[in-house]
Amino acid sequence: MNYSAVIDLVLDNIKKFVFPEEWLNLDCTLSKQDVFAMLLINRHGEIIMSRIADYVNIPMSTATGIIDRLVKNGYCVRRRSESDRRVVVISLTEKAKKIISAIKSVGNDYFEHIMQALTPEEQKFLSSIILKIMGILNNQNISLKNKKEKGPGMQKIKIE
Amino acid sequence: MNYSAVIDLVLDNIKKFVFPEEWLNLDCTLSKQDVFAMLLINRHGEIIMSRIADYVNIPMSTATGIIDRLVKNGYCVRRRSESDRRVVVISLTEKAKKIISAIKSVGNDYFEHIMQALTPEEQKFLSSIILKIMGILNNQNISLKNKKEKGPGMQKIKIE
DNA sequence: GACCAATATTTCGAAATCAGTATTATTCAT
DNA sequence: ATGAATAATACTGATTTCGAAATATTGGTC
């Protein structure tokens, strides 16, 4: 299997991939961005604005907008850090945690559905392959290109 | 490996996943949506508006906007189908084909980079696992949820 | 053929989203 | 104290998105 074949497969089946996410958003007024941000917050328990912007690779101002919306709709709360009062710490409300939990549950159903169809041997390989790929992406800093690494929390400000 | 672990892995490494796409867009004025639409058109050679909207799961009016942009920038052309003059057929220009080719080339580099790190056995398993998963997503119409399927998906439209 | 429902797409606002710049508040080093 | 650096928000104009209405075409029916 070559790369082209993979791309074609993905393109042909894109709807199947996207569907779960689509379905989840029907109930509530959450966009994909919102859901992703909530997953990120959930993953870290608490997280600061800069880190959100950094993870998702968006400007701080956009991150502010996303969190604004989530706060307005009661999905998360802002809190000033006590050690550094410039820092704003974001955390999820119970309401959001319930939704995340539901989302993960549906995702888990899909996951199980797929895993069950694989043989134990395939399951074992898949696990190790995924871990290996993650490792590659993490450690070997893609030698193909030099990514313009902007430091964590760096904000583009013209200095004259 | 359970679902939660996979989600966490993805969240922790999301930037690595997104990065290649980011890099590709630096050269030109193409958004992700644009690139995806072009890949879709490229995959089908020619494709009609409805199908684009359907694949990406966006309203037709949005699809119109995307194609407007692509046409304006010389990446694709509109053409009325002669068999059904309501239908608009989209195809790529040479300029777009060159870009798609470049994008695929970079993607292929990444792909090779990862594949090389896998053992032949792992490579073999990965291929079959991917195919199997695609098959599952395709055939077994997710029994988990009743997707509010508008219309039985495919609609036969003769093009010319 | 005339009429009408269905289909494919575009047009048209209104709302959202975004990225860049400026601003505010705070910290840190000297 | 002072100023540079940092974290976040406010503001702004430009772009994107999307639902509803409009346009054009087809196919069926009388």
Image (tube, coloured by chain):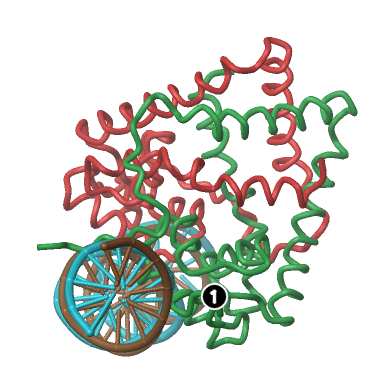
Chain colours: A green, B red, C brown, D cyan
Where is mark 1, residue-wise? A83
Place of residue C8 in the rendered image (x, y in percent of width and height, measured from the top left): 40, 58
- Can you say whether B93 is above or below A160 in the image? above
In this view of the protein, can residue B61 be seen by the observer? no
Side of D11 where D16 appears, left or right = right
Residue for point 40% across, 59% down: A153
Residue B28 position in % (x across, y down): 22, 43
Is residue A126 visible in the rendered image? The answer is: yes
User: Picture coordinates of residue B52 (x, y %)?
Assistant: 43, 51
D26, A129: nearer the viewer = A129
- Classify mark 1: helix, strand or loop: loop
Q: How many marks?
A: 1
Which of the 4 image quadrants contains residue B137? top right
Residue pictured at 44% horizontal, 28% vertical: A142
Q: Is residue B140 left or right of residue A76?
A: right
Q: Considering depth in this image, is A34 or B82 the residue closer to the camera?
A: A34
Read off the chain for label 1.
A
Above or below, A91 against B30 in this view is: below
